[in-house]
Structures are given as C-alpha cells and as structure tokens.
Image (cartoon, grey):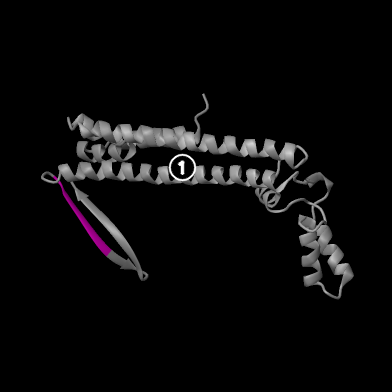
Amino acid sequence: MKITRATALILLFMLTISTLPAKSKDFLLSLAVPGFAQIKDGRGYGYSLLAAEALLIGGQLYLKSEANLLRDDSYTYALKFAHINPGDYDSEFLKNLGKYESSGYDAMGYNSTVRNQAVMLYPDDPEGQQLYIEANAYGDDKYWDWDSQTHKSEYNRMRNDAQDLESFAKLAFGVTILNHLVSGFDVLRYNASESRARFSMDYRSRTPQLKLSVKF
C-alpha cells in the first residue's frame, strides 16, 4: 500500500502526540481538532467549537465550488456571446476578454492597444513596432468579438462574483485558523491552576519575537 506524504505526516503527528503528557496532548489535539479537549473534559461549549469547525470547512468548500461554477458559466457565456474558440485560457487572457470589445485592431480592440503601445515605445522604428506587435498581439486562435457591451458586462459580473466568493472563502479559512487557536489556548486557560503559561518578547537581529512558554 502506497503511503502519501499527507498520510505520513498525520501518522507522525499522532505518534508524537501519543508520547506527550495528557495536558500537553489535549492542548495540541485541541489545536488540531477544535473542541476535542473541551468535550472530553465535560465542557459543553466544545460542541460549539466543533460545530463551528464543520460549518467553516463546509462553507469554504461551498464557496469555492460556487466560484468555480461561475467561472465555468462565464467561459460558456464567452463561447456564445464573444465567439472565442474552445480552449484552455490563462487568467491574463480571460481578464483582457472582459476588458476589450474584441481581440482585433478596431478602435476598442486589444490588438489596437498593442499597436498604439508599439508606436509609443518605438516612434521612429517601424521594424521595432512590428516585432513588438508580433510578440504581444493575439492571433486568430485567441479571437473574440463581443455581440454587445451588455454581454461583456454580464461576463465581467460573473467573473467578479466568482472573485468575491473566493475572497469569502479565504476569510472563512482565516476564521477557521482562529477557531483552532481559540480552542487550543482555551485548554491552557482552564488548566491554568495546574499549569503555568508565560508570554515574553525578545529581539533577535532587531526582529521582535513572541515566545510562549508552557509548563505542565
């Protein structure tokens, strides 16, 4: 049976945990699984920490899934209303797709902008202009031409909504980390009568360092 790197790390973590004193073990496991020690010690709010963890992880998965669906929808939309060729496009192309009316040399086209940049960069060098255009302009394989401004705006709305959902997912991830920290340090708090925790700040190479010392 092949053991993945993630599985090996989990096994190593569990092996390390098993050799620690009980209170140290509770602290680390509560960092890994919010509410673990609280539930074990009969503290009902541990279920709230555990439920919050499940909701936050589920929320992240949902938000990321919805963001991916919106991006897929925007691609299908561009196939229909911008007439792009089916393919796997990078983020820069998809951004330009929503910024310019077309890929061509018309007034609002992407290649027109490239040509104007070439003239500005090489005002007295037609050969340099041509080389710049050839290096940066889109060819027929990356053609598009929006049917209307309304369709382009709708494409951008879908892309922006997908970005917003990803931002919310990142926020949920940050709150998830906070939930782990709250759970772990709550164990230190209610075991304070039997343990001693001390914070200190030190400087090393002019860089401040925050230290936590816990004695069980």
Would residue 108 appear left or right of 203 to someone viewing this image?
Answer: right
Would residue 52 appear left or right of 188 to someone viewing this image?
Answer: right
Instruction: Point out the residue furthest to the bottom here.
Output: 124
Q: Mark 1 falls on what kind of element?
A: helix
Note whether 198 is above or below 32 in the view shown: below
* Residue 196 in the image, given as x and y percentages of width and height: 15, 50
Instruction: Point out the residue furthest to the top here.
Output: 1
Given residues 2 and 26, the one toward you in this image is 26
* Amino acid type of the residue tagged 1 in the rendering: Ala
Residue 127 image-quadrant placement? bottom right
Image quarter of the C terminus: top left
The stretch drawn in magenta includes residue 135:
no
* Residue 21 in the image, given as x and y percentages of width and height: 21, 38
Dot 1 corresponds to which residue?
169
Main secondary structure along the magenta-highlighted residues: strand
Q: Is residue 90 visible?
A: no
Note whether 202 is above or below 42 in the view shown: below
Given residues 161 and 130, the one toward you in this image is 161
* Residue 182 in the image, given as x and y percentages of width and height: 27, 44
* Residue 214 in the image, given as x and y percentages of width and height: 21, 50
Q: Residues within 10 Å of mark 1 (few under 14, many from 20)?
A: many
Residue range of the region highlighted in magenta in the rendering: 195-201
Would residue 133 appear left or right of 211 to someone viewing this image?
Answer: right
Q: Is residue 47 visible?
A: yes
The residue lying at 19 percent from left, 55 percent from top is 198
The residue lying at 18 percent from left, 45 percent from top is 189
Note whether 208 is above or below 7 in the view shown: below
Given residues 7 and 76, the one toward you in this image is 76
